[in-house]
Structures are given as C-alpha cells and as structure tokens.
Image (spheres, rainbow, N blue to C red):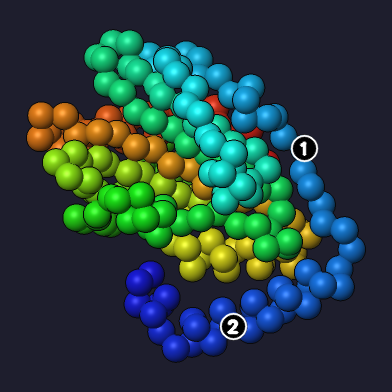
Amino acid sequence: MTGIIGSKSFVILSGVLLTQAGLFYGFSRKEKIPDRLPLAEFTLTGTTWKNVEDTDISDNEKEVLNADDLLSRVYQDQSSGRVATLFVAFFETQRTGKAPHSPKNCLPGAGYAPSSSEIVDIPVPGQPQPIQANRYIVARGDNQSVVLYWYQSHNRTVASEYWAKYYTVTDAIRYNRSDTALVRVVVGVSGGDLEKAIKTATDFAVAFFPQLKQHLPS
C-alpha cells in the first residue's frame, strides 16, 4: 500500500477526486446525516474493562478539534489492573472544513517524540475484518507510551490518512455522506515492559471495538 500511496498515479487520482469532491460539496443537495447513539451513552459491558475516569476536554481543545461528539475516558482491566485511555472524536460531516486531526501531527506538538511507527491489523472475534490501525511508540522525557489510532466510518477502519481522505470523497459521491471518527488508544509503558503495553492496548481495542461500532454510523 505504501508504494501505491507514493506513486505519481495515486497523487494524480487523489487530485482528481478532491476536485470532484469540491464540486460535489458545492452543488449537491443537503448531506445525509445518519442517526447514531451519542458517545456519552457508550458503555463497555460484558468485559473486564471498567470506566474509572471521564477526562476533561478543555474548551480550547474542543474548539481546535471542532468535532460534533467527543469521548475521553480512562479504563482499567479489573482482572489485571492494566490501564488504557480511549479517545473518540466524531464528525457528522467534513464538507464545512471539519476533519479529524491526525495524532501523527498532534503528538509531537504535545511534546511526544515518536520512536517507531507501523500499521498493524488487529483481529476481533466475530468481526468480518480486522482493525487496521497505526501503532506508535512515543516518548516524552523518560515516559513511553503506546498509541493505537485509526479512522472509522461505514463499518470500515483505515490507518492511512491518505486512504481516509480517498474514502471520504468516494463515500460523499456514492452515498452523500462524509461522516467519520478518529479512534485513539493510549497505554503508558510501565517498568520498561513495552510488549506488555502493546498487548494491553491491543486487548483493550479488541474489547471495546464491537460496542463502539453501535455509536458510529454504519
């Protein structure tokens, strides 16, 4: 996929599609906004993970994010004590210039330096396709964290920002919709045990993914 994204033909195709999207956004009928359950009503039941804190999002952060719905919580695995943070930003439409902010750009701005990154597939029992996610190892001072994030819309998960934009255009043309969500998991590395933090982030994503889907339009 990386080779395709970097190719000249992909860049040209992206330009054509974005031009089509501009015309579509400017002259089409009112966009379809699908029904969904608010993120505030999200509950993680039937697992060992429990919500232990709703973290505050400042008014300034909300203004910068410009999302239509937000969720930011800390969860703890009651069987092992493992802790993970879940952040979700949902956008009803991207026609007005609103769009998810890539953690790839936001994390360095918050003082986190990435030490490694890769795209991983996370199989989820009972789901037809694995979660396709970015996995970053970041550090701020002596503190390391594992970050998983992906873009989610229409029962699709995408790691690449390029492909997320591509699908925004094609979905807008085909379905008159441009809604999407950014889903991010952060787990701190404790005692230098990076593999344990990676497993915690992965296990947590597998636990919440089926129930989060109910709050994001299919």
Figure quadrant of the N terminus: bottom left
Choose top left, top right, bottom left or bottom right for residue 4.
bottom left
The label on residue 178 is none
| Amino acid type, residue under disc 2 in the picture | Gly
Can you give x and y, in whole percent of width and height, for residue 143 in the image? Answer: 18, 39
In-image side of 52 versus 213 (left or right):
left
| Vertical arrangement, residue 121 with respect to residue 216, above or below | below
Three-letter code, disc 1: Asp
According to the image, label 1 marks what residue? 35
Disc 2 is placed on an element classified as helix
Please state if 25 lies on the left or on the right of 131 as rendered.
Answer: right
Q: Which residue is mark 2?
A: 15
Considering only vertical position in the picture, is 17 above or below 110?
Answer: below
Residue 187, quarter of picture: top left
How far across and down, in percent of the image, does residue 110 sit? 35, 49
Q: Quadrant of residue 172?
A: bottom right
